[in-house]
Amino acid sequence: GEPERLLGYPVYTSAYVPNIAAGAIPLLFGDFSAGFFIGERGDMVFQPLYELNALRDVTTILGKMRVDAVVADTAAIRGLKVKA
């Protein structure tokens, strides 16, 4: 029942992290609450998907929102760069 940990800190995964390869940075470690900001970059857009569930008389709605992030305190977060 315990979350995975690295040096006592919780571990989070993301599908958007690059694969392990020479020159890639697949691991970030640090205090994200101290220097990591997420901002909205547009309005949320909703799109009904009528065809997806037409036979079941159900409408599915897809919501999309563009966001961006910036590291404000670069000393708080470090990346592990893979060597060749």
Image: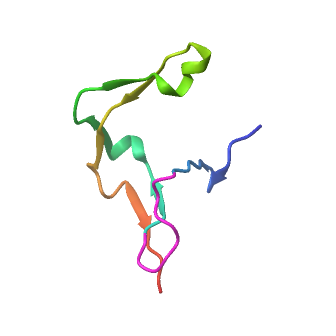
Residue toward you, 81 or 31: 81
Residue found 48% across the figure and 65% down from its top:
26
Please identify the quadrant where the N terminus is shown: top right
Q: How many marks?
A: 0
Q: Residue furthest front?
A: 55
Residue found 49% across the figure and 26% down from its top:
51
Q: Is residue 31 left or right of residue 42?
A: right
Q: Is residue 6 left or right of residue 61?
A: right
Residue toward you, 57 or 15: 57
Q: Does the magenta run of residues contain 79?
A: no
Q: Residue furthest right?
A: 1
Q: Is residue 13 above or below residue 37?
A: below
Q: Residue furthest left?
A: 42
Query: Which color scheme does this rendered protein use?
Result: rainbow
Residue 82, x across and y down, in percent: 48, 77
Q: Is residue 8 left or right of residue 2?
A: left
Residue found 68% across the figure and 48% down from its top:
4
Q: Is residue 52 above or below residue 66?
A: above
Residue 83, x across and y down, in percent: 47, 83
Q: What residue span does the magenta drawing correspond to?
A: 15-24
Residue toward you, 23 or 51: 51
Q: Is residue 71 above or below residue 56?
A: below
Residue 42, x across and y down, in percent: 22, 32
Q: Is residue 30 above or below residue 82?
A: above
Q: Residue furthest top?
A: 57
Q: Is residue 74 left or right of residue 3?
A: left
Residue 62, x across and y down, in percent: 42, 27
Q: Main secondary structure of the magenta part?
A: loop
Residue found 28% across the figure and 43% down from its top:
68
